[in-house]
Image: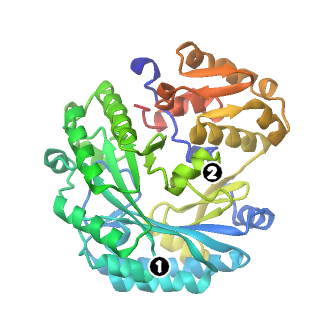
């Protein structure tokens, strides 16, 4: 089964995926999408690209530097973009904000407060909302949490990846384990409403046994959420990954065993398996929404508040407004040049056609809830499901034969084992994916 299904494919943080974005998408396309959008709630994503050290596994958009003045320059340009974009969303209320990177906590307290003040001065913020930030525990003091609280953040995500020292050395990410425990304890004591831990399986020198030990330490931390990502080894695309030797990587079988035992360990400890790489305590909003059939997925992974449009600000950020996606310039120099020239940094994007919209609904239903009611889809989308997806259902047959999917009474149900291969199952409904020559641009599923 591992050999059969271990091929490349998207993570479906969007449909169509970012591979379908092109530079024929214009500022006018974006303005039209904003005008036509039915939403009045906004989720902000702020990209901070800087990192003090290079983690060899990382495929994120980043700038490695220890010079704080580079962040000052970036904030200046980001400010121009915020001031240019904000008036377009004056009828929206911001109910979500997330800072990702890079390393958002590369910014010092003064820079963080300056940027949050500017954002709040230009957008209408709800009195209550989900305001989260990614934290690197290697380069900060515990007092950073005081700054984040003052800035209005109420959720933090701590990048741990692995507690094993040999793994940390191999990926150039050594960290103080006790500091992580102190950071988590202080965050809970200060009243941060949600804490998330990021882990990665598939890194060099990991084994099912060593990763099981890391999972036990994570249970001691007792975060509200966990993101356990599959390491995508793509050294041809990401130069830093060439420092990782293939012979040090676990096999696909070992990786699947790590994922399997992670699911068993965490669900056994009371966490709900949200899907793919997300876990949450049963009283967490993600878990509640999944049980209610209302879970959402976007470029930040599984998330809440499906009714929000998403505005990405900063280099490489992606927006999802109504029926379009729009991405900023992905490199920092072109980003600065675009801001100087136009006041914004739109690079490329995609306007969805009717088929895209239909398939987006179907793929999101499967990847968020692992089931689909064809009768409900008929009513919601105005189609006859079996006729519209005749070719797609043929592709699903191999998963039915392998007991990964069951189709009865016009309902598609993904088995517990099939959930591990949900990306593969969603590919059956991806019209663009069938252009086989492009597969190599995705990571392997296992």
Image coords of residue 49 (percent x, y): 40, 66
Q: Which mark is residue 227?
A: none
Q: Which residue is mark 2?
A: 22
Against 32, residue 274 (above or below) is: above
Q: Mark 2 Cα within 10 Å, few/some/many (few <14, many 20+)?
A: some
Image coords of residue 36 (percent x, y): 80, 63
Image coords of residue 404 (percent x, y): 53, 21
SS under mark 1:
loop
Q: Quadrant of residue 187?
A: bottom left
Q: Which residue is mark 1?
A: 152
Against 346, residue 163 (above or below) is: above
Circle 2 or circle 1, nearest the eye: 1
Q: Nearer the viewer, residue 385 or 10?
A: 385
Do we see residue 237 in this rendering?
no
**Which residue corresponds to the image point at 37% horizontal and 77% vertical from the top-left?**
71
Q: Quadrant of residue 403?
A: top right
Q: Nearer the viewer, residue 158 or 314?
A: 158
Q: Mark 1 Cα within 10 Å, few/some/many (few <14, many 20+)?
A: some
- The quarter of the rendered structure image containing the N terminus is top left
Report the Cα–Cα distance between label 2 and label 1. Answer: 36 Å
Image coords of residue 213 (percent x, y): 20, 42
In-image side of 333 versus 165 (left or right) = right
Of mark 2 and mark 1, the one earlier in the sequence is 2
Do we see residue 415 in this rendering?
yes
**Which residue corresponds to the image point at 23% horizontal and 75% vertical from the top-left?**
141
**Which residue corresponds to the image point at 24% horizontal and 33% vertical from the top-left?**
208
Q: Nearer the viewer, residue 130 or 426?
A: 130
């Amino acid at each position: 089964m591992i050999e059969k299904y271990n091929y490349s494919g998207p993570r479906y943080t969007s449909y169509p995926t970012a591979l379908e974005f092109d530079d024929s998408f214009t500022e006018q396309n974006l303005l039209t999408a904003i005008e036509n959008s039915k939403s009045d709630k906004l989720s902000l994503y702020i990209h901070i690209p800087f990192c003090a050290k290079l983690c060899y596994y990382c495929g994120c958009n980043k700038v490695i530097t220890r010079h704080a003045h580079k962040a000052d320059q970036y904030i200046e340009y980001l400010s121009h973009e915020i001031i240019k974009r904000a008036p377009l969303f004056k009828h929206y209320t911001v109910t979500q904000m997330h800072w990702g990177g890079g390393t958002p906590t590369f910014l010092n307290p003064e820079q963080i407060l300056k940027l949050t003040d500017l954002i709040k001065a230009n957008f209408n913020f709800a009195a209550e909302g989900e305001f989260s930030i990614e934290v690197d525990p290697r380069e900060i003091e515990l007092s950073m949490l005081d700054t984040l609280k003052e800035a209005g953040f109420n959720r933090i995500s701590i990048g741990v990846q692995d507690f094993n020292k040999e793994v940390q050395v191999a990926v150039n990410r050594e960290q103080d384990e006790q500091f992580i425990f102190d950071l988590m304890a202080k965050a809970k004591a200060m009243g941060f409403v949600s804490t998330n831990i990021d882990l990665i399986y598939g890194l060099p020198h990991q084994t099912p046994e060593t990763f099981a030990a890391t999972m036990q330490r994570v249970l001691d931390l007792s975060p509200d959420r966990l993101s356990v990502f599959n390491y995508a080894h793509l050294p041809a695309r990401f130069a830093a990954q060439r420092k990782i030797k293939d012979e040090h990587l676990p096999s696909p079988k070992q990786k699947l065993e790590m994922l399997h035992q992670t699911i068993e360990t965490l669900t056994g400890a009371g966490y709900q398996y949200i899907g793919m790489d997300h876990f949450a305590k049963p009283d967490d909003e993600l878990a509640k929404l999944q049980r209610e059939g209302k879970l959402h997925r976007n470029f930040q992974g599984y998330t809440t508040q499906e009714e929000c449009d998403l505005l990405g600000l900063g280099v490489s950020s992606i927006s999802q407004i109504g029926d379009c996606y729009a991405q900023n310039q992905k490199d920092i120099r072109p980003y600065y040049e675009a801001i100087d020239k136009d006041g914004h940094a739109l690079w490329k994007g995609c306007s969805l056609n009717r088929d895209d919209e239909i398939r987006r609904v179907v793929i999101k239903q499967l990847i968020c809830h692992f089931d689909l009611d064809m009768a409900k889809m008929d009513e919601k989308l105005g189609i006859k499901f079996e006729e519209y997806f005749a070719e797609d259902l043929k592709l699903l047959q191999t998963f039915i034969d392998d007991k990964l999917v069951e189709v009865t009474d016009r309902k598609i149900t993904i088995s517990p084992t099939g959930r591990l291969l949900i990306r593969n199952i969603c590919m059956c409904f991806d019209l663009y994916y069938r252009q086989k020559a492009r597969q190599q641009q995705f990571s392997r599923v296992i």
